[in-house]
Amino acid sequence: MANKFDVISIFPEYMSPLALSLIGKATKAGLVDIAVHDLRDQATDVHHTVDDTPYGGGAGMVMMPEPWGAAIDQVVSNAPNRTHDLVILTPAGEKFSQAMAEELTTCEHIIFACGRYEGIDIRITDYYKSQPNFRVREISIGDYVLNGGEVATLAIMEAIIRLIPGVIGNPASLDEESHSLESEAGLLVEYPSYTKPAEWRGLGVPEVLLSGNHAAIAKWRRDEAIKRTEKLRDLTRE
Ligand code: ADE
């Protein structure tokens, strides 16, 4: 059974990059099943309204629960007998990580709810949390505010789908990555890479990489990954 993804947005065209590159190929190969839905199809008035002013006052608009509930129920009815993971994109969510991407590859059916404006009425989160066969996660891709969840969904889907067996041509590269991302070893980033030519604009390639000595290369790469990680930690220390 292919991993199933449904994306709900008021800008379904935002998701057109999903037809490209590895994700496009994975879809054609039947490794993933992706559908994008226009939230406005669920609006019931002539203007296809999906938002309203916030109770209690304040700036901005809030997305109404009715169209969201109808859209989510519809995608669920097309995926019976599955467990559903509802991912709500919001800057107020848990920070996305590689560990979360790995966990999400095990989900049978992920529904991405792309909020806009001041977000989605919180009763959508609360209601689906109480439903059987549902898990609800509020996820942020970083401490900055986007105009909506679409770009965040693209980033998260790419991080998940590339981990699905068969999607990446050379799985050894995933293996190497996961080692360099292992937090247990304290390594967060990969070593720097070089390719041909051996000299470019006066810049050479470290001798060890040309030596053919695999043990020495592995040690150099590990040392460089540690150096990079420490530098990154210093830069991001709060
Ligand atoms: N919507 C707006 N900003 C966001 C962010 N940083 N992550 C996820 N969804 C968002």
Image (cartoon, rainbow, N blue to C red):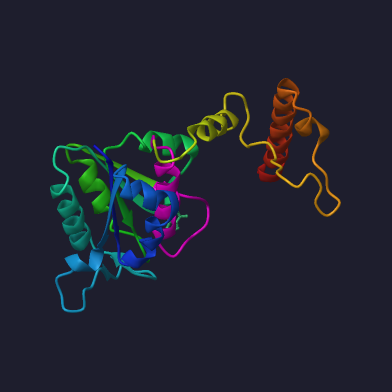
Q: Judge whether residue 106 can be spotted in this image.
A: yes
How many numbered marks are there? 0
Residue 32 in the figure: left or right of residue 128: right
Please tell me which residue lies in front, 125 or 215. 215
Tell me which corner region of the image, top left, top right, bottom left or bottom right, holds residue 121. Answer: bottom left
Where 108 falls versus 78 (above or below)? above
From the viewer's side, name the closer residue of 130 and 95.
95
Residue 100, quarter of the rendered image: top left
Magenta residues, as a range? 139-165
Residue 196 sits above or below residue 58 on the image: above
**The N terminus, quarter of image:** top left
Lateral position of residue 169 relative to residue 82, left or right:
right
| Magenta-span inclusion, residue 147 | yes
Spot occupied by residue 46 in the image (x, y as percentages of width and height): 16, 79
Horizontal side of 5 relative to 150 (left or right) equals left
Residue 9 in picture, x, y percent from top left: 31, 62
Q: Residue furthest bottom?
A: 46
**Quarter of the render that holds ligand 1:** bottom left
| Foreground residue among 23 and 212 | 212
* Farthest residue, direction top: 215
Q: Quadrant of residue 85?
A: top left
**In this rendering, position of residue 136 left or right of residue 179:** left
Residue found at x 17% / y 45%: 79
Q: Residue at x 75, y 28 (%)?
A: 220
**Does 150 appear in magenta?**
yes
- Give the residue drawn at x 18%, y 69%: 43
Q: Position of residue 29 (x, y in %)?
A: 32, 45
**Residue drawn 79% across the image and 28% down it:** 211
- The answer, for residue 118, to whether it is visible in the render is no
